[in-house]
Image (cartoon, rainbow, N blue to C red):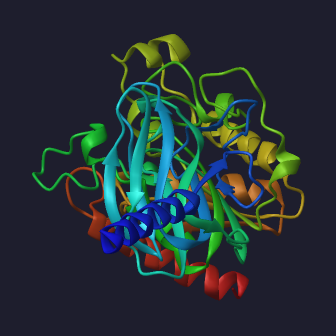
């Protein structure tokens, strides 16, 4: 009987220890690092853009997160110690999700990475429940900001059927060239991108100059650019413009141009205006005007030339051009093709900016 009492007491002590080990961490804790335009509101942190991430260093064995997803369509990568350990699809509404369990005791890094773009909905983050404790937040060596379209979003990069489906199920922004390059440089990134968007015309009724300065693309709140100053800005736009400026039957063409395609001078001046807008926000940043790797960058395309003329006319020594090689395959870049683009950009940044 005495032995049974001792066993019961030990079990209670162990249960009490486990209960104490569970630590609730508020979304406002300064040891949490938010990547991307992820505003911390009064009741939660908000994630909407591709690549918006929550990162922590912790000493422990398990982590849960409480999240509220707007539409139940977002996917997130869970990255433990720089390895993707699971992909989770969020349910609509507020739920707690197990991100990691049974980890070896000791120090770990966890990142929760939004791999889907803002039209699949916003996610609100309330906090972590950790079997352990938070450590000082992760640090990053560089800062890069991207302005891009579906290529930068990673749209359809995981669709291996050849159907090039733009569904949330096949979009993985983590595999995008933008994030491949960022990880190589240990860079904190902001990724302002949207499938179908252009500078002059989009597949819908707004363009990148309309949203580039928004906290959330479909909201009215303006982003405070003093909160984040990139060393390098990469602009990879014009793929959608290259299609739509000749699509006379498309509603946006008719709305913007009537029946006459825009002249090259019109296209070039609008590109210059957008780059000037970025320069006004970041007076010291290096701006890379990129294009590719879809057919806007293939041999014979006029669009690289438009960018070159726009950049030349800016007379800004810190604005550069870089064109990704035309991939010469149907549809959007696959994960493998995104990797090749990322390696291309890594090499370019290393050689040009000596990172």
Position of the C terminus, as image quadrant, is bottom right
Q: Is residue 106 visible?
A: yes
Whole-percent x and y of residue 307? Answer: 61, 54
Closer to us: 329 or 55: 55
Q: Residue at x 68, y 83 (%)?
A: 352
Left or right of residue 284, residue 158 in this image: left
User: In this view, which residue lies farthest toward the left?
Assistant: 161
Check the image and report above or below for 4 versus 220: below
Closer to us: 226 or 6: 6
Whole-percent x and y of residue 30? Answer: 78, 56
Position of the N terminus, as image quadrant, is bottom left
Check the image and report above or below for 81 versus 64: below
Q: Residue at x 45, y 19 (%)?
A: 253
Q: Residue 2, located in which quarter of the rendered image? A: bottom left
Q: Residue at x 68, y 58 (%)?
A: 32
Q: Residue at x 51, y 11 (%)?
A: 255
User: In this view, which residue lies farthest toward the front?
Assistant: 1
Check the image and report above or below for 311 versus 187: above
Q: Is residue 321 visible?
A: no
Check the image and report above or below for 261 versus 289: above
Whole-percent x and y of residue 317? Answer: 83, 69
Left or right of residue 220, residue 242 in this image: left
């Amino acid at each position: 009987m005495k032995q049974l009492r001792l066993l019961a007491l030990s079990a209670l002590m162990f249960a009490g220890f486990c209960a104490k080990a569970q630590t609730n961490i508020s979304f406002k804790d300064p040891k949490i690092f938010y990547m991307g335009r992820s505003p911390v509101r009064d009741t939660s942190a908000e994630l909407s853009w591709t690549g918006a991430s929550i990162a922590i260093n912790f000493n422990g064995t398990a982590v849960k997160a409480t999240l509220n997803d707007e539409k139940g369509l977002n996917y997130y990568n869970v990255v433990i110690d720089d390895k993707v350990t699971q992909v989770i699809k969020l349910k609509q509404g507020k739920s707690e999700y197990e991100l990691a369990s049974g980890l070896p005791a000791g120090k770990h890094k966890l990142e929760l990475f939004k791999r889907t773009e803002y039209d699949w909905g916003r996610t609100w983050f309330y906090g972590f429940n950790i079997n352990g404790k938070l450590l000082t937040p992760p640090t990053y060596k560089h800062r890069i900001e991207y302005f891009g379209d579906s290529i930068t979003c990673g749209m359809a990069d995981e669709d291996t059927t050849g159907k090039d489906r733009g569904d949330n199920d096949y979009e993985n922004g983590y595999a995008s060239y933008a994030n491949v390059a960022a990880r190589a440089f240990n860079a904190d990134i902001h990724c302002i991108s949207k499938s179908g968007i252009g500078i002059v015309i989009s597949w819908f009724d707004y363009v990148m100059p309309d949203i580039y300065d928004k906290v959330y693309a479909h909201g009215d709140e303006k982003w405070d650019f003093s909160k984040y100053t990139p060393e390098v800005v990469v602009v990879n736009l014009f793929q959608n413009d290259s299609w739509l400026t000749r699509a006379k039957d498309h509603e946006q063409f008719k709305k913007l141009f009537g029946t006459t395609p825009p002249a090259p001078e019109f296209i070039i001046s609008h590109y210059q205006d957008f780059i000037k807008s970025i320069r006004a926000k970041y007076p010291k940043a290096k701006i890379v005007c990129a294009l590719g790797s879809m057919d806007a960058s293939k041999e014979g395309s006029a669009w690289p030339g438009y960018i070159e003329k726009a950049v030349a006319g800016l007379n800004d020594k810190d604005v550069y051009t870089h064109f990704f090689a035309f991939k010469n395959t149907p549809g959007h870049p696959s994960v493998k093709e995104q990797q090749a683009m990322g390696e291309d950009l890594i090499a370019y940044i290393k050689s040009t900016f000596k990172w």
